[in-house]
Protein backbone atom coordinates (compact mmCIF):
# COMPACT_ATOMS: atom_id res chain seq x y z
CA UNK A 1 0.00 0.00 0.00
CA UNK A 2 1.13 3.55 -0.70
CA UNK A 3 1.59 5.86 2.27
CA UNK A 4 -1.55 7.91 2.83
CA UNK A 5 -1.66 11.58 3.79
CA UNK A 6 -5.39 11.92 4.30
CA UNK A 7 -6.71 9.88 7.25
CA UNK A 8 -10.47 9.81 7.77
CA UNK A 9 -12.02 10.40 11.18
CA UNK A 10 -14.26 7.50 12.19
CA UNK A 11 -17.74 7.97 13.61
CA UNK A 12 -17.68 8.50 17.38
CA UNK A 13 -19.67 5.32 18.00
CA UNK A 14 -17.47 3.10 15.77
CA UNK A 15 -16.57 -0.25 17.32
CA UNK A 16 -14.01 -2.79 16.18
CA UNK A 17 -15.60 -5.55 14.10
CA UNK A 18 -14.29 -9.01 13.29
CA UNK A 19 -14.51 -9.78 9.57
CA UNK A 20 -13.97 -13.40 8.56
CA UNK A 21 -13.34 -14.49 4.98
CA UNK A 22 -14.05 -18.20 4.59
CA UNK A 23 -12.08 -19.77 1.76
CA UNK A 24 -13.39 -22.96 0.13
CA UNK A 25 -10.40 -24.15 -1.93
CA UNK A 26 -9.44 -23.76 -4.64
CA UNK A 27 -10.63 -20.17 -4.40
CA UNK A 28 -10.64 -17.42 -6.97
CA UNK A 29 -7.77 -15.40 -5.50
CA UNK A 30 -9.28 -12.03 -6.41
CA UNK A 31 -12.50 -12.91 -4.59
CA UNK A 32 -10.42 -13.15 -1.41
CA UNK A 33 -7.83 -10.43 -1.94
CA UNK A 34 -10.19 -7.79 -3.41
CA UNK A 35 -12.54 -7.48 -0.41
CA UNK A 36 -9.62 -8.02 2.01
CA UNK A 37 -7.81 -5.00 0.54
CA UNK A 38 -10.88 -2.82 1.14
CA UNK A 39 -11.03 -3.68 4.85
CA UNK A 40 -7.23 -3.36 5.13
CA UNK A 41 -7.38 0.13 3.60
CA UNK A 42 -10.13 1.06 6.07
CA UNK A 43 -7.80 0.07 8.91
CA UNK A 44 -4.92 2.05 7.45
CA UNK A 45 -6.95 5.18 6.78
CA UNK A 46 -8.78 5.33 10.08
CA UNK A 47 -7.65 8.28 12.20
CA UNK A 48 -7.67 7.79 15.94
CA UNK A 49 -5.58 4.72 16.61
CA UNK A 50 -8.13 1.91 16.73
CA UNK A 51 -8.41 -0.23 13.60
CA UNK A 52 -12.11 -0.60 12.77
CA UNK A 53 -11.71 -4.18 11.59
CA UNK A 54 -10.00 -7.37 12.68
CA UNK A 55 -9.63 -9.23 9.38
CA UNK A 56 -9.08 -12.98 9.35
CA UNK A 57 -8.90 -15.57 6.57
CA UNK A 58 -10.28 -18.97 7.59
CA UNK A 59 -9.49 -21.99 5.41
CA UNK A 60 -11.80 -24.96 5.10
CA UNK A 61 -8.77 -27.03 4.11
CA UNK A 62 -6.87 -29.20 6.67
CA UNK A 63 -4.24 -26.49 7.18
CA UNK A 64 -3.88 -22.72 6.77
CA UNK A 65 -2.46 -22.96 3.26
CA UNK A 66 -5.32 -21.99 0.94
CA UNK A 67 -5.03 -23.16 -2.65
CA UNK A 68 -6.19 -20.76 -5.37
CA UNK A 69 -7.13 -21.35 -8.99
CA UNK A 70 -4.17 -19.25 -10.12
CA UNK A 71 -1.74 -21.72 -8.56
CA UNK A 72 -0.58 -19.00 -6.18
CA UNK A 73 -1.21 -20.09 -2.60
CA UNK A 74 -2.67 -17.92 0.13
CA UNK A 75 -1.98 -18.32 3.84
CA UNK A 76 -4.89 -18.06 6.22
CA UNK A 77 -5.03 -17.23 9.91
CA UNK A 78 -6.77 -20.45 10.95
CA UNK A 79 -8.59 -23.52 9.70
CA UNK A 80 -12.32 -24.01 9.88
CA UNK A 81 -11.76 -26.65 12.54
CA UNK A 82 -9.87 -24.12 14.67
CA UNK A 83 -12.59 -21.52 14.06
CA UNK A 84 -15.21 -23.98 15.28
CA UNK A 85 -13.29 -24.56 18.49
CA UNK A 86 -12.65 -20.88 19.16
CA UNK A 87 -16.24 -19.77 18.54
CA UNK A 88 -15.12 -16.11 18.55
CA UNK A 89 -17.82 -13.58 17.62
CA UNK A 90 -18.10 -12.77 13.90
CA UNK A 91 -19.55 -9.47 12.75
CA UNK A 92 -19.26 -10.00 8.98
CA UNK A 93 -18.70 -13.29 7.18
CA UNK A 94 -17.69 -13.44 3.51
CA UNK A 95 -17.75 -16.82 1.76
CA UNK A 96 -15.41 -17.31 -1.20
CA UNK A 97 -14.95 -20.28 -3.49
CA UNK A 98 -13.91 -20.96 -7.07
CA UNK A 99 -15.09 -22.37 -10.37
CA UNK A 100 -13.83 -25.83 -9.40
CA UNK A 101 -15.33 -25.64 -5.91
CA UNK A 102 -19.05 -24.95 -6.12
CA UNK A 103 -19.92 -28.31 -7.71
CA UNK A 104 -18.60 -30.16 -4.65
CA UNK A 105 -18.81 -27.91 -1.60
CA UNK A 106 -17.36 -29.22 1.65
CA UNK A 107 -20.29 -30.54 3.72
CA UNK A 108 -18.54 -29.58 6.94
CA UNK A 109 -18.39 -25.98 5.73
CA UNK A 110 -22.08 -26.04 4.77
CA UNK A 111 -23.08 -27.40 8.17
CA UNK A 112 -20.94 -24.76 9.88
CA UNK A 113 -22.54 -21.98 7.81
CA UNK A 114 -26.00 -23.21 8.71
CA UNK A 115 -25.13 -23.34 12.42
CA UNK A 116 -23.06 -20.14 12.62
CA UNK A 117 -25.07 -17.72 10.46
CA UNK A 118 -27.75 -16.88 13.08
CA UNK A 119 -25.04 -15.32 15.26
CA UNK A 120 -23.46 -13.26 12.45
CA UNK A 121 -24.62 -9.69 11.74
CA UNK A 122 -23.88 -9.87 8.00
CA UNK A 123 -23.44 -12.98 5.85
CA UNK A 124 -22.00 -12.41 2.38
CA UNK A 125 -20.91 -14.43 -0.63
CA UNK A 126 -18.52 -13.50 -3.40
CA UNK A 127 -19.28 -14.93 -6.85
CA UNK A 128 -19.87 -18.71 -6.69
CA UNK A 129 -19.73 -18.58 -2.90
CA UNK A 130 -23.50 -18.10 -3.31
CA UNK A 131 -23.73 -21.85 -3.96
CA UNK A 132 -22.43 -22.51 -0.44
CA UNK A 133 -24.98 -20.12 1.08
CA UNK A 134 -27.73 -21.74 -0.97
CA UNK A 135 -26.65 -25.25 0.05
CA UNK A 136 -26.85 -24.15 3.68
CA UNK A 137 -30.40 -22.87 3.09
CA UNK A 138 -29.42 -19.27 3.80
CA UNK A 139 -30.78 -18.00 0.48
CA UNK A 140 -34.17 -19.73 0.61
CA UNK A 141 -36.86 -17.17 -0.18
CA UNK A 142 -34.26 -14.43 -0.71
CA UNK A 143 -33.15 -12.49 -3.76
CA UNK A 144 -29.56 -13.34 -4.67
CA UNK A 145 -27.03 -13.00 -7.44
CA UNK A 146 -23.85 -14.67 -8.59
CA UNK A 147 -21.66 -14.53 -11.67
CA UNK A 148 -23.97 -14.30 -14.69
CA UNK A 149 -22.32 -17.35 -16.26
CA UNK A 150 -23.61 -19.68 -13.51
CA UNK A 151 -26.77 -17.85 -12.45
CA UNK A 152 -29.06 -20.25 -14.29
CA UNK A 153 -27.34 -23.21 -12.67
CA UNK A 154 -27.86 -21.66 -9.24
CA UNK A 155 -31.56 -21.12 -9.98
CA UNK A 156 -32.05 -24.66 -11.27
CA UNK A 157 -30.23 -26.30 -8.39
CA UNK A 158 -31.87 -24.19 -5.68
CA UNK A 159 -35.39 -23.28 -6.85
CA UNK A 160 -36.23 -21.61 -3.52
CA UNK A 161 -33.69 -18.88 -4.30
CA UNK A 162 -34.85 -15.82 -6.27
CA UNK A 163 -31.84 -15.58 -8.56
CA UNK A 164 -31.28 -12.29 -10.40
CA UNK A 165 -28.27 -12.50 -12.77
CA UNK A 166 -28.18 -8.77 -13.50
CA UNK A 167 -26.96 -6.76 -10.44
CA UNK A 168 -23.36 -6.74 -9.29
CA UNK A 169 -24.55 -7.33 -5.73
CA UNK A 170 -27.80 -7.74 -3.83
CA UNK A 171 -28.74 -7.16 -0.20
CA UNK A 172 -31.74 -9.10 1.14
CA UNK A 173 -32.07 -8.68 4.90
CA UNK A 174 -28.65 -9.34 6.42
CA UNK A 175 -27.54 -11.56 3.53
CA UNK A 176 -25.46 -10.10 0.69
CA UNK A 177 -24.51 -11.85 -2.54
CA UNK A 178 -22.23 -10.48 -5.25
CA UNK A 179 -21.34 -11.32 -8.82
CA UNK A 180 -17.69 -11.88 -8.04
CA UNK A 181 -14.44 -10.75 -9.65
CA UNK A 182 -14.35 -6.95 -9.21
CA UNK A 183 -17.86 -6.79 -7.75
CA UNK A 184 -16.54 -8.29 -4.51
CA UNK A 185 -14.66 -5.02 -4.07
CA UNK A 186 -17.87 -3.03 -4.69
CA UNK A 187 -19.68 -5.07 -2.05
CA UNK A 188 -16.89 -4.63 0.49
CA UNK A 189 -16.89 -0.86 -0.13
CA UNK A 190 -20.61 -0.77 0.58
CA UNK A 191 -20.13 -2.72 3.80
CA UNK A 192 -17.51 -0.20 4.91
CA UNK A 193 -19.84 2.65 3.96
CA UNK A 194 -22.57 1.11 6.13
CA UNK A 195 -20.19 0.91 9.09
CA UNK A 196 -18.03 4.01 8.78
CA UNK A 197 -19.65 6.36 6.30
CA UNK A 198 -19.53 7.03 2.58
CA UNK A 199 -16.57 9.43 2.81
CA UNK A 200 -14.23 6.68 3.99
CA UNK A 201 -15.52 4.25 1.35
CA UNK A 202 -14.96 6.91 -1.30
CA UNK A 203 -11.38 7.55 -0.17
CA UNK A 204 -10.67 3.81 -0.24
CA UNK A 205 -12.08 3.58 -3.78
CA UNK A 206 -9.82 6.45 -4.85
CA UNK A 207 -6.75 4.82 -3.33
CA UNK A 208 -7.61 1.55 -5.04
CA UNK A 209 -7.67 3.61 -8.28
CA UNK A 210 -11.22 2.58 -9.07
CA UNK A 211 -13.02 4.50 -11.80
CA UNK A 212 -16.10 4.75 -9.57
CA UNK A 213 -17.76 3.03 -6.63
CA UNK A 214 -20.67 1.11 -8.12
CA UNK A 215 -24.01 0.67 -6.33
CA UNK A 216 -25.51 -2.79 -6.07
CA UNK A 217 -28.09 -2.11 -8.78
CA UNK A 218 -25.39 -1.63 -11.40
CA UNK A 219 -25.65 -4.28 -14.11
CA UNK A 220 -22.92 -6.93 -14.35
CA UNK A 221 -22.28 -5.84 -17.94
CA UNK A 222 -23.49 -3.14 -20.26
CA UNK A 223 -26.83 -3.59 -22.04
CA UNK A 224 -25.33 -1.86 -25.04
CA UNK A 225 -22.52 -4.44 -25.01
CA UNK A 226 -25.05 -7.23 -24.54
CA UNK A 227 -26.90 -6.13 -27.67
CA UNK A 228 -23.77 -6.75 -29.73
CA UNK A 229 -24.20 -10.46 -29.00
CA UNK A 230 -27.52 -10.50 -30.85
CA UNK A 231 -27.43 -12.65 -33.95
CA UNK A 232 -30.19 -10.83 -35.86
CA UNK A 233 -28.62 -8.16 -38.06
CA UNK A 234 -31.80 -6.06 -38.08
CA UNK A 235 -31.82 -5.96 -34.28
CA UNK A 236 -28.14 -5.07 -34.18
CA UNK A 237 -28.78 -2.15 -36.49
CA UNK A 238 -31.75 -1.04 -34.40
CA UNK A 239 -29.75 -1.18 -31.16
CA UNK A 240 -27.05 0.99 -32.69
CA UNK A 241 -29.69 3.43 -33.93
CA UNK A 242 -31.24 3.57 -30.44
CA UNK A 243 -27.90 4.44 -28.83
CA UNK A 244 -27.50 7.32 -31.30
CA UNK A 245 -31.04 8.67 -30.83
CA UNK A 246 -31.65 8.53 -27.09
CA UNK A 247 -32.93 12.13 -27.19
CA UNK A 248 -35.89 11.09 -29.35
CA UNK A 249 -39.19 9.53 -28.39
CA UNK A 250 -38.52 5.79 -28.71
CA UNK A 251 -41.84 4.00 -28.51
CA UNK A 252 -42.18 0.39 -29.52
CA UNK A 253 -44.23 1.52 -32.53
CA UNK A 254 -41.42 3.82 -33.72
CA UNK A 255 -38.84 1.06 -33.28
CA UNK A 256 -41.01 -1.46 -35.10
CA UNK A 257 -41.44 0.94 -38.02
CA UNK A 258 -37.67 1.47 -38.06
CA UNK A 259 -37.13 -2.28 -38.56
CA UNK A 260 -40.13 -2.69 -40.90
CA UNK A 261 -41.71 -5.25 -38.58
CA UNK A 262 -44.85 -5.44 -36.51
CA UNK A 263 -44.84 -4.53 -32.82
CA UNK A 264 -45.49 -8.15 -31.92
CA UNK A 265 -42.58 -9.37 -34.06
CA UNK A 266 -40.22 -6.78 -32.58
CA UNK A 267 -41.14 -7.81 -29.03
CA UNK A 268 -40.43 -11.45 -29.91
CA UNK A 269 -37.05 -10.47 -31.39
CA UNK A 270 -36.01 -8.66 -28.21
CA UNK A 271 -37.17 -11.52 -26.00
CA UNK A 272 -35.34 -14.08 -28.14
CA UNK A 273 -32.07 -12.21 -28.61
CA UNK A 274 -31.74 -10.05 -25.50
CA UNK A 275 -34.18 -11.58 -23.00
CA UNK A 276 -35.89 -8.24 -22.41
CA UNK A 277 -38.56 -5.98 -23.89
CA UNK A 278 -37.89 -3.06 -26.28
CA UNK A 279 -39.04 -0.54 -23.64
CA UNK A 280 -36.83 -1.99 -20.91
CA UNK A 281 -33.88 -2.11 -23.29
CA UNK A 282 -34.28 1.58 -24.13
CA UNK A 283 -34.55 2.51 -20.45
CA UNK A 284 -31.44 0.51 -19.55
CA UNK A 285 -29.37 2.07 -22.34
CA UNK A 286 -30.60 5.55 -21.36
CA UNK A 287 -29.69 5.01 -17.72
CA UNK A 288 -26.26 3.69 -18.65
CA UNK A 289 -25.70 6.85 -20.69
CA UNK A 290 -26.75 8.94 -17.67
CA UNK A 291 -24.28 7.01 -15.50
CA UNK A 292 -21.47 7.75 -17.94
CA UNK A 293 -22.33 11.46 -17.93
CA UNK A 294 -22.30 11.58 -14.13
CA UNK A 295 -19.10 9.54 -13.95
CA UNK A 296 -17.31 11.97 -16.25
CA UNK A 297 -18.34 14.87 -14.05
CA UNK A 298 -21.14 16.47 -16.06
CA UNK A 299 -23.08 18.83 -13.76
CA UNK A 300 -26.12 19.99 -15.70
CA UNK A 301 -29.07 17.67 -15.11
CA UNK A 302 -30.96 19.70 -17.71
CA UNK A 303 -28.43 18.74 -20.40
CA UNK A 304 -28.29 15.12 -19.24
CA UNK A 305 -32.09 14.85 -19.39
CA UNK A 306 -32.34 16.51 -22.81
CA UNK A 307 -29.64 14.34 -24.36
CA UNK A 308 -31.06 11.08 -23.02
CA UNK A 309 -34.77 11.52 -23.62
CA UNK A 310 -36.05 12.46 -20.15
CA UNK A 311 -38.66 15.20 -19.98
CA UNK A 312 -37.55 16.43 -16.55
CA UNK A 313 -35.04 15.84 -13.78
CA UNK A 314 -37.83 14.40 -11.64
CA UNK A 315 -38.70 11.78 -14.27
CA UNK A 316 -35.02 10.86 -14.50
CA UNK A 317 -34.65 10.73 -10.71
CA UNK A 318 -37.57 8.31 -10.35
CA UNK A 319 -36.32 6.01 -13.12
CA UNK A 320 -32.74 6.11 -11.82
CA UNK A 321 -33.79 5.39 -8.22
CA UNK A 322 -36.08 2.56 -9.28
CA UNK A 323 -33.28 0.95 -11.26
CA UNK A 324 -30.24 1.52 -9.02
CA UNK A 325 -31.74 2.11 -5.59
CA UNK A 326 -30.05 5.52 -5.27
CA UNK A 327 -30.60 8.96 -6.80
CA UNK A 328 -28.41 10.44 -9.56
CA UNK A 329 -26.88 12.84 -7.03
CA UNK A 330 -26.06 9.99 -4.65
CA UNK A 331 -24.54 8.09 -7.55
CA UNK A 332 -22.36 11.09 -8.45
CA UNK A 333 -21.24 11.49 -4.84
CA UNK A 334 -19.89 7.95 -4.78
CA UNK A 335 -16.92 8.95 -6.87
CA UNK A 336 -16.90 12.74 -7.03
CA UNK A 337 -16.73 15.33 -4.26
CA UNK A 338 -16.97 18.30 -6.58
CA UNK A 339 -20.13 20.47 -6.55
CA UNK A 340 -23.47 18.77 -7.12
CA UNK A 341 -25.02 18.52 -10.58
CA UNK A 342 -27.25 21.53 -11.13
CA UNK A 343 -31.00 21.22 -11.39
CA UNK A 344 -32.73 22.69 -14.47
Image (spheres, helix red, strand yellow):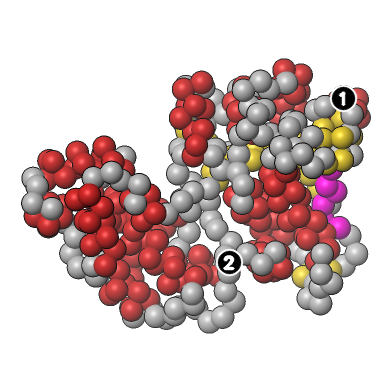
Res 95 seen here? no
Q: Which residues are magenta?
A: 51-57
| Count of numbered circles in the view | 2
Q: Residue at x 44, y 78 (%)?
A: 298
Q: CA distance from mark 1 to mark 2?
A: 39 Å
Q: Residue at x 82, y 40 (%)?
A: 73
- Pointer 1 or 2: first along the chain: 1
Location of mark 2 (residue): 211
Can you give x and y, in whole percent of width and height, for residue 257 in the image? 9, 55
Q: Is residue 36 left or right of residue 221?
A: right
Q: Nearer the viewer, residue 261 or 208?
A: 261
Q: Is residue 143 left or right of residue 262?
A: right
Task: Bin the neighbour count of mark 1 within 10 Å (Cα to Cα): few under 14, some 14-19, many 20 and up.
Answer: few
Location of mark 1 (residue): 62
Which secondary structure, mark 1?
loop
Which secondary structure, mark 2?
loop
Res 66 seen here? yes
Q: Work out whether 257 lies above or below 137.
A: below
Q: Is residue 267 magenta?
A: no
Q: Main secondary structure of the magenta part?
A: strand
Can you give x and y, in whole percent of width and height, for residue 316 in the image? 34, 65
Residue 232: which quarter of the image?
top left
Q: Residue at x 38, y 65 (%)?
A: 289
Can you give x and y, in whole percent of width and height, for residue 157 in the image? 51, 21
Amino acid sequence: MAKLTKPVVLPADARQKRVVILGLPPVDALDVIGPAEVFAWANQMADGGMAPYVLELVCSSPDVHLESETGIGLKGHSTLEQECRSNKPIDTLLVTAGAMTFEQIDRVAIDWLRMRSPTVRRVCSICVGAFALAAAGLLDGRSATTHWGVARRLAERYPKVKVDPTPIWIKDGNVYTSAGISSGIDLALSLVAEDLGNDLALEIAKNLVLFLRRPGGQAQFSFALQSQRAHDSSLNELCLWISEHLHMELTVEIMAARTSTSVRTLIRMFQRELQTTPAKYVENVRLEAVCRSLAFGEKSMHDICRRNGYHSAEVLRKAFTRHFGITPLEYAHRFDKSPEPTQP
